[in-house]
Image (cartoon, rainbow, N blue to C red):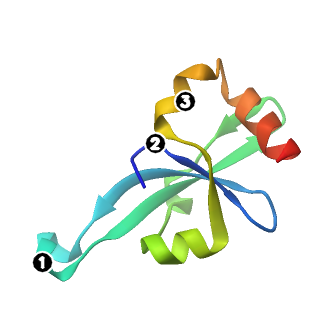
Amino acid sequence: MKLGDIYINKENKSLIQIDSFASHMGDFLKGHVIIFRQLEEHGDLIGSIPSFNGYGSKEEIESEYELLVPQEKLKEYDDWNKIFELAKTH
């Protein structure tokens, strides 16, 4: 799981993107959580709202989502519309 990876929900096809990693009060020895942003399509507008960010462990996220576009392949997509089209056919 890397920053920028895009995951698709296994049931409702919603998209998230890995945004950052966090630890409680900077204590890296106690583990970390993964912060993701919800990617949404509103007509011609595509984006995310920081107040709708989510978090979870790698295991929690992978139980509900699967990798759609790895961060290394993002450059192959001209815009977000193509990623949402891919999600609809996935």
Quadrant of the image occupied by residue 11: bottom right
| Looking at the image, residue 41 lies above or below residue 16 | above
26 with respect to 78 (left or right): left
Report crowding for label 2: few under 14, some 14 to 19, many 20 or more residues within 10 A (C-alpha). some
Question: In the rendered picture of this protein, how many numbered marks are placed on residues?
Answer: 3
Going from N to C along the chain, the mark reached first, 2 or 1, is 2
Identify the residue at the far right of this view.
Answer: 89
| Looking at the image, residue 43 lies above or below residue 24 | above
Type of residue at label 3?
A: Leu
Say which residue label 2 marks: 4
Type of residue at label 2?
A: Gly
Residue at x 65%, y 17% (from the top left corner): 78
Work out whether residue 65 or residue 48 is closer to the camera in this orientation and state it.
65
Whether tag 3 and tag 2 are in contact, CB under 8 A, the answer is: yes
Cα distance, mark 2 to mark 1?
Answer: 24 Å
Going from N to C along the chain, the mark reached first, 1 or 3, is 1
Residue 74 image point, x, y percent: 55, 29
> Could you say whether the residue bearing mark 2 is in a helix, strand or loop?
loop
Cα distance, mark 1 to mark 3?
Answer: 32 Å
Residue at x 80%, y 29% (from the top left corner): 44
Say which residue label 1 marks: 29
Label for residue 74? 3
